[in-house]
Each structure stands twice: as structure tokens, then as C-alpha cells.
Amino acid sequence: MKNFDLIVVGGGPGGIFAAITAAEKGFKVALLEKNKRIGNKILVAGSGKCNLTHVGKPKDFLDKYGESGKFLKEALNKFSPDKLREFFAENGLSLVLVEESGKFFPSTFSSVDVVSLLRTKLTKLNVQIVENFKIEEILKVNDEFHIVSDKEEYRAKNVLLATGGKSYPGIGTTGDGYIFAKNLGHKIVPPQPALAPIFVKEYKFEELSGISFQDVKIIFWKENKKLIEKMGSILLTHTNFSGPGILDNSRYVESGTYMEINYIGLDCEGFNKNIIESINTDGKKTVKKYLLKYMLPERFVKKILTISEISEDLKLSELSKIKRENLARMLTSNKMEISKVGNFEMAMVTKGGVSLEEINSKTMESKKVRGLYFAGEILDIDGDTGGYNIQGACSMGVLASKSMGK
Ligand SMILES: Cc1cc2nc3c(=O)[nH]c(=O)nc-3n(C[C@H](O)[C@H](O)[C@H](O)COP(=O)(O)OP(=O)(O)OC[C@H]3O[C@@H](n4cnc5c(N)ncnc54)[C@H](O)[C@@H]3O)c2cc1C
């Protein structure tokens, strides 16, 4: 049996930053990880380049976590994006800003360097890293937690659960933390995939995979009621819509809701007005050439013409009213029924998890079980793409450890 001041369960960014912060204040800390190595999610983050945080102050971050953003106010103030960047710079890996996206990456653009730095830091601070550790159960006995495994038993006054969500189960995040939390008396909001691609019925762009659109208007509908309207970038893939504008909003939709994309920045009426003007003044121009003036990719224009049964050499003057109106709808306000949101294998994060109602946002401690803390994706909070999830997990981990007593 081994005794600690803090046992952190889960070696992702939330758990690692909690372990570092507690060790820095003199706690004896163990970090338990079920995989062979800590930091698996960090390794895949940002396609291996690791987008650690975003440009902006804590207050600019709050609306990037759906309706739960204010829960993170204290955590982001305690460990802000600036502090995260300072941490890495002080430990020998500065972060660089990619201006167009506002994302910060390590200067080497390598997740491996991030994990290696964090492991070195944990080791220097004498955090006991226990990998390949399979927990059987977590019990609270009097004022002590017992972490029972098939090998050894670990005990501590404080436990921090940072086991992540259910997305990308192949790399270790299979929702174990929900079971531990539930057994300790916590309510779990049903987990669902988020930051996931969106599939629509009768998807028509299979062969346009790789084409993207910057800053288009995307509207989501539920039974004729507008759920949300956002500007964002989209990517067409072989089977679905993806890209930041889709991923970030996938948390709001489900099968049976509708998605509308405006590819040209003009509403239906505006498009009709403009094309009618051109029909009158420039009727010999082909419809295809006319559409290209909206800076649309040529392959996309050809596909839209095919779907609308308009031949590529059809002149503006030959375009019927029905086909013109259909074209206007396709480009500005075509409502597509959502068949599903990508599953946990595809989703980058998990929506749902340990209910925030039962967690003190000023300390990250459970309101139900003294000494039990949470950080990261295990909680019912998920951020947009762009570094918000890693920043959120790190900030929660730091706040938890700063708040803990021995
Ligand atoms: C492909 C992909 C790309 C991403 N890119 C980015 C990005 O660029 N920027 C960004 O901000 N976010 C990104 N994210 C999201 C981000 O990685 C996560 O939100 C973040 O890592 C969550 O941190 P966490 O500490 O809560 O948990 P995780 O990083 O999920 O770590 C949880 C850890 O707990 C361990 N664990 C689980 N169960 C147990 C158990 N029973 N016992 C012991 N250990 C256990 C897991 O093995 C895992 O190591 C990406 C996610 C994916 C899937």
C-alpha cells in the first residue's frame, strides 16, 4: 500500500497540470495512467502538431464552451492562456502563434516535444508516474481514498479524476471516469460525441472531398425553429461536412435537425436580383461563368450545375425561372436534413459527462465528496476547436491543485 497527498487518475493535460501544480506546492503526488504512456491525446492533438491554446484573454474564451463557459471563469483566470505560454517558454519550448487561425502551437510543431517536456517536468518534481495501471475501483473510506487495482493499492487524502471523455476510445478514453464518479455519488449527463462531422441525408458532394469554404454562414434548424446561426469554415469530405464551422456546432444538433449553408454571402433574394440583372445585361455569358464570379471552386460549381440539371454551356438568357430559383436556393439556403453526427470514434471531444451542478467551479472540488476533484473532458463541458479544450483541461487541473489542502 502506498500513501500520497494527491492521486491523479488520468495522464492527459488536465491530470498532468494538476500533478505538476500540486508537486510544486510540496505535495507527494502519484499520476496513474491506464495506457503504456501518459499523454496519448496530446500526441494526436492538432494532427500531431498540438494546438495548445488560442490567442485572447480569459474573458474571450468563455463563449467558446457553449452554454457552460462561465463555469471556467475561475480556472481560466487562475491559469490563463498567457500563463500556459509562459509555462512552456520557461521550460524550454516557446509557443508560436499562427496568425490566420489564432492558434498557438509549440515552436517545433511537434506533440512529441510537448509530452516529453511534461514528462521531464513531472519527473523533476518527483511525481510518481505509474503507467499501465488498471484501476478496479475507487473507494472513500473515512477521509481517505483507496484506489484498488489488481496489483497494488494506493491511498490519498485527495483524488483528482481526469480520465477524459469517451471520444477516441482506441487511445484509452473509454469513459471509465464516469463509472468512478457515479460510484462516488455523482450525476452523469449522458455523454455524446462533439467536435464531430455532420452527416446529411442524400449527401451530394462525395467526389468534392477536400474542397473548403472560408467564413460561410451556417444555420441549424429544428422543426422550423432556428437553433443557431454562425459564420465558420467548412470542409467537404467523402461522406460528410466537416471543418471548424461544422465541428464547433456539432454539439447543438442531432439526427432530424436541419443544416443550411450559404456558400456565397448573399441571401436568396440578393442572388436572384443580381442574376436577373446579368441575364438582362450579359445574357450570352454561361451560367457556369457567372457563378465563378462568386469565387466558388470550379469543381463545386460544376457539381451544383449537375445537381440542378443545368448544362455547362447554358447561357444566362436560356436559364428558366424554376432553374434560377432552384440554383439560388442551392447556393444560399438549401436545408439538408441531418442524418447523424459522427460517432465517438470520429468525435474529437465528448459533450456531457460529470454534471457541473455538483462541482464547485471556484475549486474544482466535488460538492458531494470532500477531497474529490475533477479536471478536463470528464466534466460536462466541451470547447470549440482551436486550443480551447487543452487550455480548459490545463486550467481546471491547475485550479484544482491550487485549491487543495493536504
Ligand atoms: C484527434 C484529436 C485532436 C485534438 N486536437 C486538439 C487540439 O489541437 N487542441 C485542443 O485544445 N484539443 C484537441 N483535442 C481535444 C483534447 O485533446 C482533449 O480535450 C484533451 O486532451 C482533454 O484532456 P483531459 O486531460 O481531460 O483528458 P485526456 O487528454 O483525454 O486524457 C485522459 C487520460 O486518462 C487516461 N485514463 C482513462 N481511463 C483511465 C483509467 N481508468 N485509469 C487511468 N487512466 C485512465 C487516458 O488513457 C488518458 O491518457 C483533440 C482531440 C482529438 C481526439
Image (cartoon, grey):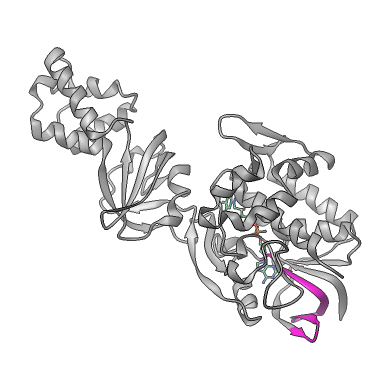
Quadrant including the C terminus:
bottom right
316 in relation to 120, above or below:
above
Residue 354: % across, % down: 59, 70
Residue 222: % across, % down: 31, 57
In this rendering, position of residue 4 left or right of residue 388: right
Look at 37% across and 60% down and name the residue there: 254
In this rendering, position of residue 275 left or right of residue 97: left
From the viewer's side, name the closer residue of 194 and 61.
61
204 in relation to 322, above or below:
below
- Stretch in magenta: 140-162
Look at 24% across and 20% down and name the residue there: 289
Quick check: can you spot residue 97?
yes
In this rendering, position of residue 204 left or right of residue 41: left
Q: What is the quadrant of residue 124 in the picture? A: bottom right
From the viewer's side, name the closer residue of 54 and 404.
404
241 in relation to 138, above or below:
above
Q: What is the quadrant of residue 380 in the picture? A: bottom right
Dominant secondary-structure state across the stretch colored magenta: strand
Q: What is the quadrant of residue 264 in the picture? A: top left
Residue 178 among those drawn in magenta: no
Residue 349: % across, % down: 54, 57
Look at 55% across and 48% down and name the residue there: 64
Quick check: can you spot residue 52?
no
Quadrant including the N terminus:
bottom right
Q: Quadrant of ligand 1?
A: bottom right
Residue 161: % across, % down: 70, 68
